[in-house]
Image (cartoon, coloured by chain):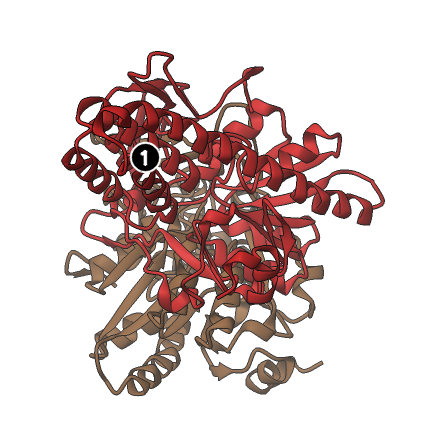
Chain colours: A brown, B red
Amino acid sequence: MKINGVPYRTIWPSADRRSVTIIDQTRLPHEFVTRSLANLDQAAHAIKAMQVRGAPLIGATAAYGLALAMNADPSDAGLKTAYDRLLATRPTAVNLRWALDAMQTGLTPLPPAQRALTAWQRAAALCDEDVAINEAIGRHGKSLIAQAWERKGCQGSVNILTHCNAGWLATVDWGTALAPIYAAHDGGIPVHVWVDETRPRNQGASLTAWELGQHGVPHTVIADNAGGHYMQHHRVDLAIVGTDRTTASGDVCNKIGTYLKALAAFDNKVPFYVALPSPTIDWTISDGLVQIPIEERAGDEVSHIPGLAEDGRITRVQVTPKGSAVANPAFDVTPARLVTALVTERGICPATPEGLRALFPEKAP
Amino acid sequence: MKINGVPYRTIWPSADRRSVTIIDQTRLPHEFVTRSLANLDQAAHAIKAMQVRGAPLIGATAAYGLALAMNADPSDAGLKTAYDRLLATRPTAVNLRWALDAMQTGLTPLPPAQRALTAWQRAAALCDEDVAINEAIGRHGKSLIAQAWERKGCQGSVNILTHCNAGWLATVDWGTALAPIYAAHDGGIPVHVWVDETRPRNQGASLTAWELGQHGVPHTVIADNAGGHYMQHHRVDLAIVGTDRTTASGDVCNKIGTYLKALAAFDNKVPFYVALPSPTIDWTISDGLVQIPIEERAGDEVSHIPGLAEDGRITRVQVTPKGSAVANPAFDVTPARLVTALVTERGICPATPEGLRALFPEKAP
């Protein structure tokens, strides 16, 4: 997608295969800063410090981290050290392990002298695959936006609500939930996005708003509390969100607060779509509420809010009283009954076991 | 209720009837600052700048604002100017008009020379009535908490979710939604309150958490996004909120986001109670969604968040990108079908026209 008119990916290698460049997302939306990662240490730090975030982008960064490590030490010991080091950066990120395993499987059989070149090639291929998946999600999801546009008699614009950041900043390009929005916008359908700020980490206000703005997509940031009201007043034509983990029955585990928006969409007959690359489907579970453990994150994400101070510095302020306890569950589970449809790289399906299996017959038990 | 062990009201007149003192709620929870209001301008500013907020306290402040105005100019013109000036400060607040009308009705027939003294007496009486109403709401609502406590077999504590601040800071004392909680806590029922932070103005994180903490009530601040998740996992025994305006049919207009919590409560069979003094009932309307206009407040309440900086100053940080639009509807309407019961000073009733009319037969059309 574009930043200030120039197309970017979120991660890209140098031509000489000595470094890889990322966007430091901890500085967004207030500063656009890129960082060149030249070794394993810097790649591990970028993941751990959340300069890169979003499951697909974490996987891509880890893959390039292994490639950087192979430049320095392509021995078996070097490979193991790099794998362990990168895996430890975000122990709960499933994509991280998946990407590292895919890299390791390809590199281990090779003689050390061939590992660096292959690692760079495989990391690039992994990124291209992510882009292809998201582009396909965008193509399929665009048809849903086109339908909403036709239901409105092609008047005004299609108002789309989204939660958190499932945009290109979370992936290598396009994003998941935002891919259909970019595809519709680029294809000439007028869209307007209601951006949930997404407390406590404000990924909507800071990342989704920034990337939509840079690409020229009309949008309005709202408090997470406001979406239901806009649905009641027919000012939301559809909602679309991403997912961190999807059960075989279509339950969706996504950023905390997604469930509340799904309830409001259901109550107001607003279509509620979930966009997902198929690797986020966990075919082994079918009851999201019971089977998905919810990460409890640090309380200071609730009690303290970072932002741009009036003096231009990026700082944070405390909003709670000293002595008040805080709690911070990071995700919630939206039952499949509230999801209108799932949008995958293979197409659109109902959020049901049958719907998912029809698109992914090879996963049938 | 208590601050640091000392009982307070939120507003109190000076003995010489030249001024009235308020707690500057814009400085909470980080600083406890009182302000003396000595004239109409200062009273209007206190309401408009939300140094005082909450429908009953706004009404009380407006009443004292009229009394201050009568000190300076008790003529018919002075009365009309003060009435209009105060009414314009918060157009959605039905209590504001009610309090001003009550004052005006009592003052208009009097000769100007008698108006000031009468105004101070009537403002004081209006405050005492508010305290009596809230104490009664607390007594009735406490029975609902006691029932929840018995349903749990008197084990653990009763977990109560609330949204925004309908506490004693929003009234003259006790509060509306929090009155039953204080009554239960003071009466020995163990309670724990989930405090929605209540974006965009964070009245939950800043005011509800502060007043509960000062009075010694166990509580935990959560993002507005988290309440549905806790209800899904049986960690909320009941929800209780206030209301700015209630229709004759039991629809409830309260702080933005209330509707989302009511949906989640309904979906999880969690009792959802609304506490209200009867002056907030608008007997002339019966369809809240259609008939209640929703105030749109300044966008910088969403884009900028105030709090305590690390250097100890109270400042604000911007969380949205430059150039992103923001929208800020301040209230939403929760349909009566989602409300388990209304808690009034006369007792508890279903959120139906019949329920309300049974408690207030004099309002029958």
Instruction: Residue at 41%, 45% (x, y): give it.
Output: B199
Where residue B52 sits: x, y (%)?
36, 32
Residue A186 in percent (x, y) is at 22, 74
- Quarter occupied by residue B115: top left
| x 56%, y 72%: residue | A338
Comparing A84 with A198, the one in front is A198
Please tell me whether mark 1 sits on a helix, a strand or a loop: helix
Please name whichever residue, A220 or B126, is drawn nearer the observer in this view of the structure: B126
Instruction: Specify the farthest residue to the top.
Output: B16
Q: Camera-side residue: A319 or B244?
A: B244
Question: Does residue A244 appear in this view?
Answer: no
| Image vertical order of residue A123 relative to residue B134, above or below | below
- Above or below residue A21? Residue A359 is below
Residue at the image position 30 percent from the left and 53 percent from the top: B295
Q: Report which residue position mark 1 lands on.
A: B62
Q: In this view, does B136 lie to the left or right of B71?
A: right
Q: Determine which quarter of the picture holds residue B261.
A: bottom right
x, y (%) of residue A144? Answer: 38, 82
